[in-house]
Amino acid sequence: MSALYEVENVSLDLAAPSAGLQRLLPGPAPRMTILSNLSLSVGQGEMLGLVGESGSGKSTLARAMMGLVKITEGNLRFEGQPVRSRADFVKVRQGAALMFQDAVASLSPRRKVAAQIIEPFQINGVPLPDGEKTPLAMLERVGLPPALAQRYPHELSGGQARRVSVARALALKPKLVIADEPTAGLDVSVQAEILNLMTGLRRDMGLSFLIITHNLAVVRHVTDRVAVLYLGRMAEWGPTREVFSRPYHPYTRSLIAAEPQADPRKRRADLALKGEIPSVLARPTGCEFHTRCPLARPRCASEEPRPQMITPERMVRCHFAEETRIETQGGNHGT
């Protein structure tokens, strides 16, 4: 599978928020690292899941890929071409689209649905392929009736608003859609409809998807591969089925163990996450996860783990990945 979008050793630093007298002190403001030496790729026609708790850097990475925030170090490539300048990101935004988490809030309350769907054409100076029929064709593609074209966002249900956001994302026929929490706030039945819509678009249009979500059930159901972020670093990545059946990183194992289970015998209290994710203003030394890790040892607090390739398709950043692999061969840990 050839890579469509590549993120290579990307770091992103921002000025730390200052308050009170700190604003009056001379010198540069302190910096905080949001993303650190992060690498991943989205293949042609692939669905890649990106998971992690709030504050892990998932949405920041999506914004960096679209040029909405500037990376500090590293390289971005879209369709094999380096992405560095503003002109490069203009091309990216014509070939990739971002679906925002809150579908209703992403739509202007003052504009009808038809006007919102054709907005990408206007912003990019692209002629409408079918004139006034374009928004109607886009609505039909996502399973909505033409009558909705003349409605305002507040007249839509949550599922309809999400479908409109999908239609707008597809306006310029992108090759990649970055979907930030595409099923958030929707009923289970509507979630299934949206996921079926996305998988159908992937099949019919050859689309690639980067799905950012807290919902591991979504990732398990529709993605080919999954990447696990913790505090702006990659903890583990690999084929979805393998990661869920045999997670190597304790953080991945804890996330999976925290999934709701109908069978209480499958719950793993010993792997439950404790405490909140640390602030990027006070990153723990060594392995950032050691302050919450149920398997932490003294080495974890002082030495940063390096990425280990378990197989050509599996990577994990953990000092004791080999021991974890041996241990997990005996059970599925809640899956």
Image: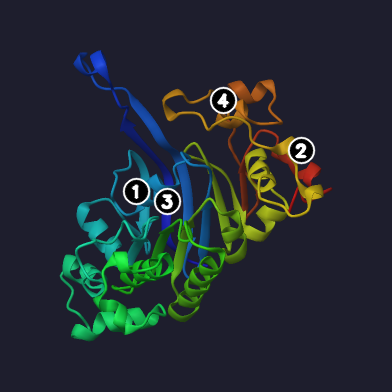
Q: Which badge, 1 or 2, is on the more N-terminal residue? A: 1
Residue 323 is labelled as 2
- Residue 195 in the image: above or below residue 132: above
- Residue 156 in the image: above or below residue 32: below
**Residue appearing at x 59%, y 25% in the figure:** 303
Q: What residue type is labelled 3?
A: Val
* Number of numbered tags placed on the structure image: 4
Circles 1, 2 touching at the beta carbon (< 8 Å):
no
| Position of the C terminus by quadrant | bottom right
Q: Name the residue under label 1.
A: 64
Residue 286 is labelled as 4
Q: Is mark 2 on a helix, strand or loop?
A: helix
The spot of residue 217 in percent (x, y) is 61, 58
**Residue appearing at x 21%, y 53% in the figure:** 86
Q: What residue type is labelled 2?
A: Glu
Circles 1, 3 touching at the beta carbon (< 8 Å):
yes
Q: Which of 89 and 2 is in front in this view?
A: 89
Kindly report the distance in space between the C-alpha atoms of the residues bearing marks 1 and 3: 10 Å
Q: Which of 130 and 117 is in front in this view?
A: 117
Kindly report the distance in space between the C-alpha atoms of the residues bearing marks 4 and 3: 24 Å
- Residue 21 in the image: above or below residue 319: above
Kindly report the distance in space between the C-alpha atoms of the residues bearing marks 1 and 4: 26 Å
Q: Mark 3 points at which residue?
A: 7
